[in-house]
Amino acid sequence: MGAHHELLDAARAETGLTDFGEDTFLEGLEVLVRALQQEAALNSTGQAALRKMIVGLLSQRLQIEDWYRRQPEIDDERITAPLIGLGLPRTGSTALSFLLAEDPNARSLRMWEATAPCPPPSTVHGDDKRIEDGRADVAERKRTSPRRVALVPASATGPTECQSLMALDFRAHFFQAFAYVPSYSKWLLNADLTSTYRYELRALKLLQWGFEAQPWRLKCPTHLLFLDDLDKVFPDARFVMTHRDPAEVMVSVADLYAAVARSYCDDIDERYLGQLNIEHWSVGMERALAFRQKAGDDRFYDIDFRAMQRDPLGEIRGLYAWLGEPVTPEFEAGMQGWWRENAEKRERNVHPDPATFGIDVDRIRPLFADYTARAAAWTAH
């Protein structure tokens, strides 16, 4: 893996650039690299993949700063009232984001551009090589981890979570799905993500620059843990929150973490993954409830997982009525097509026995009792 200094040098050499912008990212980078070296027990695939990922993130940062230096007007872009999807993972938020991405009058964060925001998409004419790279990544994921693909739909041109943009500041949850990094996970739980969201905003402006501004549809379950910080950077954001029984969720998300990590590590500690997720999501939900109390429920629209399964278009019509935006015939047809095409892939997954992850379902419920009671009231609309 190399020390973090060596990774910074590798990114400089790869791009011929030297300015990483504000140095807020260095703390997370140091904590992460130390954890990967001392705790992770990566196999050779994992060593190569994570090194490539980290150098890639640093290279993107260098390029983002270079574009801002050459085109300072990028900073004049305005990201107004984004709709941000959140909720526990495995609550139907991915399907929701794919349906929302069918709206021709809104803008999603697409997988290929989240992974590589530079060059800004508006500057590329003709075929964008990143789309092909994204398709190759998805194919590789299917080959190395078919279980991961079964659990989460992925498409190079489809919407993706904010993780890759948050990772530019090295404060992102997805690092802990790739490997056992307990010291990083502990640090992240209490980290300040204000700089992370500021950098995400910087990347979004770059992606929007050169296009007519459209309302953004973003999504990331892990925002739950950091809503106070997110709110400082996106004070006019509105939220769509998806809900499902937390006991079902914990087994499902631990299963996903294990599916991802199996590609990179030969030895997986399933019980640790169970505990990690219970801790992070119960803390996250406590913080989210406190934020809602303070920010007011009127910034949130709530969708129950089962209602979404039963009548997805009905739920989205309700959401759009709340947003005060029209569901156009084109949008409706796109959603119907996506739902039909993906119907056979949905909810056929059989998760392992909770005991595999050391999860006792009856002990989880009390941790989420406040949330469960509130969610029942929120989704009774």
Image (spheres, helix red, strand yellow):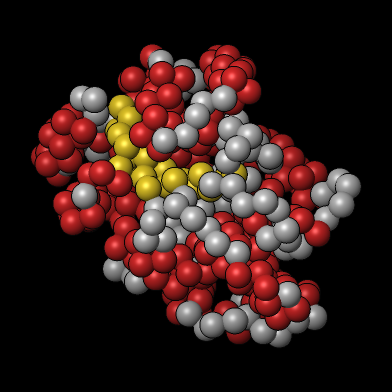
One can see residue 3 in this view: no
Farthest-out residue, right: 126
Direction from residue 140 to residue 225 in the image, left or right:
left
Q: Which of 172 and 33 lies nearest the eye of the viewer?
A: 172
Residue under the point 49% across and 55% down: 80
Q: In the rendering, at what x and y percent does residue 315 appear?
A: 39, 23
Q: Is residue 233 left or right of residue 283?
A: right
- To which quarter of the image does residue 335 belong? top right
Residue drawn at the location 33% of the way across and 30% of the way down: 303
Q: Residue 32's spot in the image, x, y percent?
A: 47, 70
Residue 155 lies in what quarter of the image? top right
Residue drawn at point x = 23 percent, y = 55 percent: 295
Q: Viewed as shown, does residue 290 lie left or right of 329?
A: left
The reply to whether residue 294 is visible in this rendering is yes
- Up the image or down, 126 lies above or below 65; here it is above
Front residue of 60/313: it is 313
Q: Quadrant of residue 157?
A: top right
Residue at point 49%, 47% (across, down): 218
Which corner quadrant holds the C terminus?
A: top left
Residue nearest the viewer, comparing 248 with 101: 101
